[in-house]
Amino acid sequence: SARIMIVGEAPGATEDELGKPFVGRSGQLLIRLFGEIGISRDEIYIANVLKCRPPENRDPLPLEIKKCGAFLASQIEFVNPVVIVPVGNFATRYVLQTKEGITKLRGKSFNIGNTIVIPTVHPAFVLRNGKRAEADMLADIQTIKK
Ligand code: URA
């Protein structure tokens, strides 16, 4: 059980090896930023849209999203979090069932039943784009505290 759920795209190489979500560089960044608002990893349920790493880290295919997404939908139903934070385009599009991109949706809050959804950028994007992107992500995460 958890009040906060993070949804990522798919396991990376480290995650695939260890069988745990967000334990590589992206995960460390994400958890550090949650730490800045006083929320630790053990308070968060972490899941991905895809349950296996796509070959060569390619984008998830529509059929993969459909098949694996059914498991994610069950996870969301069981955990029944207060807040879901999808990170990046694939997770946000799945959770909100939209075609809209993350640039438009990040930092806003949406209601799905009793759950609040606050999308943010993917931490891998922040790792590639530096401090400005990190500040945006932190601002989105601070919305959760409110
Ligand atoms: N990127 C993701 O989207 N999920 C992970 O678990 C790790 C990296």
Image (cartoon, grey):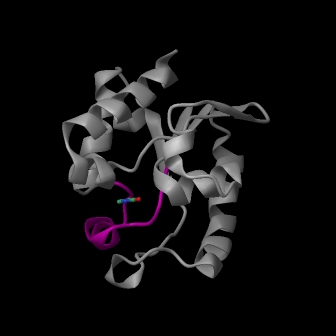
Q: In which quarter of the image is ligand 1?
A: bottom left
Residue visible at 61% across and 71% down?
A: 65
Residue 44 place in picture, x, y as percent: 46, 38
27 in relation to 90, above or below = above
Residue visible at 42% across and 45% down?
A: 121
Is 63 inside the magenta-drawn segment? no
Q: In which quarter of the image is residue 97?
A: bottom right
Residue 54 place in picture, x, y as percent: 42, 79
The residue at the far right in this view is 113
Of 128 and 16, nearer the camera is 128
122 in relation to 18, above or below = above
Residue 101 place in picture, x, y as percent: 56, 52
Of 89 and 28, nearer the camera is 89
Is 17 inside the magenta-drawn segment? yes
120 in relation to 15, above or below = above
Residue visible at 24% across and 57% down?
A: 24
The residue at the far top in this view is 146
**How many numbered marks are there?**
0
Residue extent of the magenta highlight:
6-22
Image quarter where the N terminus lies is top right
Residue 2 place in picture, x, y as percent: 55, 35
Q: In which quarter of the image is residue 59?
A: bottom left
Q: Is residue 70 visible to us here?
A: yes
Residue visible at 54% across and 55% down?
A: 91
Q: Is residue 48 visible to us here?
A: no
Q: Quadrant of residue 23?
A: bottom left
The residue at the far bottom in this view is 55
Residue 64 left/right relative to 129: right
Of 140 and 100, nearer the camera is 100
